[in-house]
Amino acid sequence: MRSDLVFGALSHVSNRYQLCQLASKATRKLHKPNTRLQDTTNEVLDRFHTANPGTVSPVVAAAAQPVERRRAA
């Protein structure tokens, strides 16, 4: 149920208003066409339950691979 997801997400965000603001922004960014908006919202709340939405997640750097460059003939 969604109420369980909301209460789980509140473990990281203490303010319900802030949770609604963060969830709406994340839902807009993560929503894919041809999927239900409700499913996207549930996914966002589930992610908020496992990770703190107020912190920036570390960006995984791509493995350092040599870049091929074209040379003029």
Image (cartoon, grey):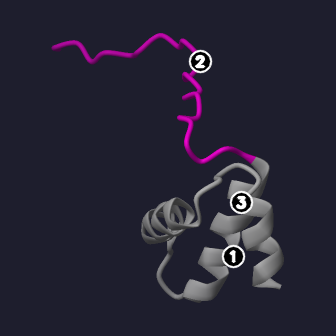
Residue projecting furthest to the front: 15
Of residue 58 and residue 64, the one placed in the foreground of this image is 58
Sequence-earlier tag: 2 or 1:
1
Q: Residue at x 50, y 66 (%)?
A: 17
Mark 3 Cα shell of 10 Å, populated few (<14), some (14-19), many (≥20): some
Amino acid type at circle 3 is: Leu
The answer for how far apart the CA atoms under marks 2 and 1 are is 33 Å
Relative vertical location of residue 72 with respect to residue 47 in this rendering, above or below: above
Q: Main secondary structure of the magenta part?
A: loop
Instruction: From the top left corner, tell me how far across and down residue 15 is, in percent.
Output: 58, 58
Specify the amino acid type for callout 2: Ala
- State which tag comes first along the sequence, 3 or 2: 3
Residue, x 52% and y 88% (percent of image)? 34
* Front: mark 1 or 3: 3
Indicate the amino acid at tag 1.
Answer: Asn
For image coordinates 83% across by 75% down, the residue present is 4
Residue assigned mark 1: 42
Magenta segment, which residues? Answer: 51-73
Going 78% across and 68% down the picture, which residue do you hit?
Answer: 7
Q: Is 61 on the left-hand or right-hand side of 70?
A: right
Q: Secondary structure at mark 3?
A: loop
Q: Is residue 39 visible?
A: yes
Image quadrant assignment for residue 58:
top right
x, y percent for residue 48:
68, 56
Residue 32 is inside the magenta segment: no
Label 2: element kind: loop
Residue, disc 3 = 10
**Real-space Cα separation, disc 1 to disc 3, in angstroms:** 14 Å
Q: Quadrant of the C terminus?
A: top left
Locate the N terminus by quadrant.
bottom right
